[in-house]
Amino acid sequence: MTEFTESFQNDLAQLMRWRRDVRSFRTDTVDEALLSECLDAFLMAPSVGLSEPWRLIRIHSAAARTAAFENYKIANADALAGYAGEKAAHYSKLKLSGMTDAPVQFAIYCDETTPKGHGLGAATMPEMRRYSVVGAINLFWLAARARGLGVGWVSILDPEQLNRDLEVPQNWSLVAYLCVGYPQAMSDTPELETVGWEARRQELPLETR
């Protein structure tokens, strides 16, 4: 059994503390070898039934990026319409996407009908495949942060429209749209807390049965 030193444990805690959702990126190019090292985290990620259901599409062409950003703008306008008064004014000032600047962008999908894993663990809870994708994303996020990169998760999107624009198989479900690059600045405080949108809990809600 591998035992980790107290120093390593402290470093890991620091890494998790500084793993923030980044929305403001520098436009510097990300070295492909460095990016590949980060993506290798997917190969180490756990998955239900060892199904490895994640499917990655790199959003690289001008056409794909334009379609994704237009999708975001429409969805963001719809989201703004759901607020009123002070909250609407506050929402309108939030920077919720790094899509215009992030040099690397991915659409991360879950293959809902992958034969890999033979359905183990997914018969009663098929959503476990998507949870597996989320877990893999988190490992990638930590790997990227450890190497000085930032990651931002854009969830204000119309998944069905993005699926059509990217021409993905019907059995794929969008889990995340990720922006990756060097952050303009880093903080150990969530940006939404910094701007007063919401506060992080200081204690974990835990119940016993």
Image (cartoon, helix red, strand yellow):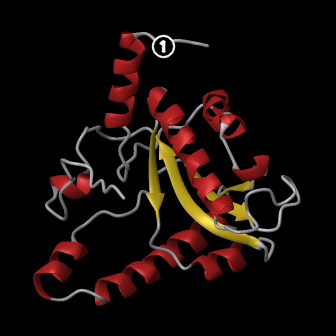
Question: Which residue is found at the position 35% from the left and 28% from the top?
Answer: 13
Viewport quadrant of the C terminus: bottom left
Describe residue 50's horizontal placement relative to residue 38 as left or right.
right
Tell me: residue 82, above or below residue 26.
Answer: below
Describe residue 152's horizontal placement relative to residue 128 as left or right.
left
Given residues 199 and 58, the one toward you in this image is 199
Tell me: residue 205, above or below residue 87.
Answer: above
Answer with the quarter of the image where residue 192 lies.
bottom left
Residue 61: image x %, image y %?
A: 68, 59
Residue that sits furthest to the front in the current view: 209
Given residues 116 and 109, the one toward you in this image is 116
Residue 31 shows up from this direction: yes
Answer with the quarter of the image where residue 197 lies.
bottom left
Residue at which label 1 appears: 4
Question: Which residue is found at the position 45% from the left and 83% from the top?
Answer: 74
Residue 101 shows up from this direction: no
Residue 204: image x %, image y %?
A: 26, 50
Q: Amino acid at mark 1?
A: Phe
- Secondary element at tag 1: loop
Question: Which residue is found at the position 38% from the left and 35% from the top?
Answer: 16
Residue 83: image x %, image y %?
A: 24, 86
Given residues 8 and 144, the one toward you in this image is 8
Question: Which residue is found at the position 48% from the left and 50% from the top?
Answer: 102
